[in-house]
Amino acid sequence: MSKLRPQLGAIEAMALSVGIMAPTAAMALNGSLAASITGTAVALAFLGAVITIILTSYSFIEFSRQFAHAGSVYIFNGISFGARMGFLSAWGLLLTYTAFTVASTAEVGLFFQTFLGLMGVNVHWIIPALVAAALIWFLAHREVRLSTRTTLVVEGLSVLLILVLAVVILGRGGAHGLSTIPFQIPKAGFSAVALASVFGFLSFAGFEGAATLGEETGNPKRSIPRAILAAVLFTGTFYLVISYTQAIGFGTDDKGVAAFAGSTSPLVDLAKTYLGSTMAIAISLGATVSAFASALGTGLAASRLLFALGRDGFGPAALGNVHPRHASPYVAVATVMSIAIVLDIILVEQTGAAVFAYAGTVGVLALLLVYLVTQVGAIKLFRSVGRWRGAQPVIPLIAIGLLGYALYANVYPIPPAPYNYFPYGVLVWVALGIVIVFVSPKLVVRIGKALSEVDRTPVDRAAAVEVGEP
């Protein structure tokens, strides 16, 4: 069986999760998209997403303590429910990560277009998007350590710039003074908050990405859970602070909300207002490289999932190949990045912001389904083996309720076009996966064999406490 090489630590694994979430890029656009739906209550929408993801992450952390595998939910849900559900979970998450790669490369194009525009240069978003995709392909083809370290440095510098801006805005009291309005239910009602929370989930999407590095991380059953928890807590805090800062910075009256909702670069616009054009240019560049880090992270995660499926018999056998020098799943990398490039080119007539919103929404809808299945799988598995007792299953049960409501809010009331079509597209993808597993008995047998060979030795909790594991 093809093997990936252990070469990462907990910090580098965390870098992948943080890189996929790309907090700088997320807050450089997702706040505006949320404001266009929920008006003043952007921070409330993000708060709902933060709470839901913290609860959801509990099951992923527990699974990661037990299993270390490039397939992530492929193995988690496969062991809980069997080979078919394992494949379908990976199939859904593959759509998510691939859609996010499309979204994030388009976002790179959008932010770089804004960056050049601030200096009087006009360029179509597709050009920097394709350059970014080519560079991501190159980095993902090489050793994963190079990619994760690049991600960590890039995102860290970008976050620092935004925190400086936040301190200035809050220190000045924003446009109309500090208030709790961004956390209050808006005129549009709570359903609008739930619908807007999809962009909160989009900001968190990929928090579990570190789990796909289970075969490439030293001592993964301790390092991966630690990486996931740290990534969720760090980004959750950052999102709450910055979403509130943006709402206060633009102002909570009708004029301020309209400006926030209509902005395609809210952080850049706020930087211009509060700190001048130089800081706006710096943040615009920071958002660009953060979006790049996100696309790199989702490209890495998608390729690991596809590699795990290919190694177990899905598609051409070459999908399961590992590069002899770089130890990367290079054929899977080439497949994922080729798809992302083709889809960006097909959508070239749309704006970069539209491509990001469309592809991101598709990815989130698929992700919510996978998260729901994973919560149920955790309850089923850990109760059956006696690992969870008492009130522990209550945590994923609450997560199921919140995830289910978020999914429901994205289909009813029926959202405007083209968002009303996206749930059907995800259902078609799921249906295709169901067809694949029911017409490919050999694939199911091979997946079952792979599941039986997974190391199920749990991490020693006592030792974990000794080293300060969360």
Image: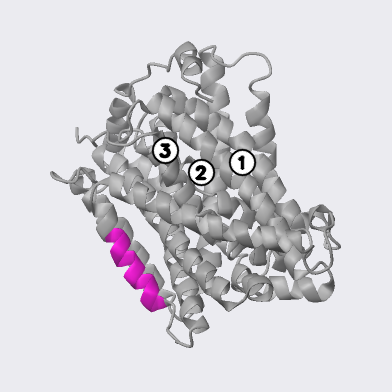
Q: Amino acid at mark 3?
A: Ile
List the residue tagged with mark 2.
207
Which one is in front, 125 or 365? Answer: 125
List the residue tagged with mark 3.
11
State the separation of the CA atoms marked 1 and 2: 9 Å
Count of numbered badges drawn on the protein: 3
List the residue tagged with mark 1.
53
Give residue 123's position: percent from left, percent from top. 42, 84
Determine whether label 1 and label 2 are within 8 Å by CB.
Answer: yes
Nearer the viewer's eye, disc 3 or disc 1? 3
State the separation of the CA atoms marked 3 and 2: 14 Å
- Mark 3 or mark 2: name the one nearer the start of the chain: 3
Image quadrant where residue 325 sits:
top left
Q: Which residues are magenta?
A: 126-137
Q: Is residue 238 left or right of residue 134?
A: right
Residue 457 can be seen in this image: yes
